[in-house]
Amino acid sequence: MKKKLAALLLPAVVGLLALSQSGCKTLGLEQTEPGFVSLFDGKTLTGWDGLPNHWKVQDGAITGYTEKESPLKGNTFLVWTNGTVANFELRAKYRIIPVNDVGFGNSGIQYRSKVVDAGGFVVGGYQADFEAGKTYSGILYEERGRGILAERGQRTRITEVNGQTKITKVGDLSPSAELQANIKANDWNDYVIVADGNHLNHFINGRMTIDVVDDQPSKAARSGVLALQIHAGPPMLVQFKDIRIKKLP
């Protein structure tokens, strides 16, 4: 598994091209969503790699889980191993299910990220965040980096001033509480990520949650790995399905 992740640190030039020739006809994506290819076959973790005792396929979905008997000391990730992503639109469904009535759950979709620890499947970079709570779903967070780059409902521009990151709120989208009310608890939600140059957008269930222009050249990532997160903490269970991507020019 370490060899697979180590390979991701080298430039990947064939990942999305290979996907364009994959078995998408069986999913009907060429008719329903032109240009999109599937990243998950609905049956196995082929094309993904992570800690085997925390990831599996259950009920036709990629399932990440922690248990009281096997807690995580830090966040871990299931990494897509067929290439890297740069300019793209990604669509997926997610849900967090309470475990033992704890009600905890925090996860996210990493993109344009870097492998920090191959053995522990740890990555850092842009994250389309979501949770079982009512605060962070839809935000833009930079794992192991600059932290929250846009809260839910914000338009922001990121620059550098005297060597320091400056995040400027330049406008509002919908109120955060209104966007939260559009998110279904313990059920499937649609997440869309659009990364086009330095312009980043997140959508949940058709509503834009953040609009960011990252104008900090020393920090802004233009390409990197794609991964799914399990957050350290109490037992949790998160699921993903219908993961598909379209390469943008």
Image (cartoon, rainbow, N blue to C red):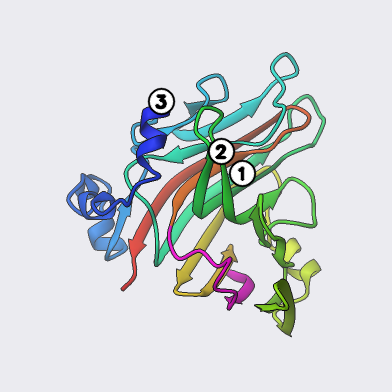
* Disc marking residue 188: none
Q: Identify residue for label 1.
A: 95
Displayed quadrant of residue 204:
bottom right
Displayed quadrant of residue 33:
bottom left
Indicate whether 13 appears above or below 77.
below
Tell whether position 222 is magenta.
yes
Foreground disc of the pair 3, 2: 3
Provide residue 75's location: percent of width, then percent of height. 66, 36
Q: What residue type is labelled 3?
A: Met
At label 3, counting other C-alpha atoms closer than 10 Å, the crowd grade (few under 14, some 14-19, many 20 or more) is few
172 left or right, relative to 51 = right
Q: Residue at x 73, y 78 (%)?
A: 162
Q: Which amino acid does label 1 sit on?
A: Arg
Q: Element under label 3?
A: loop
Q: Identify residue for label 3.
A: 1
Q: Identify residue for label 2.
A: 239
Provide residue 82's location: percent of width, then percent of height. 32, 43
At label 1, counting other C-alpha atoms closer than 10 Å, the crowd grade (few under 14, some 14-19, many 20 or more) is many
Q: Element under label 1?
A: strand
Indicate whether 216 appears above or below 7.
below
Q: Which residue is drawn at 41% across and 35% down?
A: 5
Q: Work out how far the residue at label 1 is from the one at label 3, CA to CA, in angstroms.
A: 27 Å
Q: Which amino acid does label 2 sit on?
A: Gln
If the image is split into quadrants, where does the N terminus sit? top left
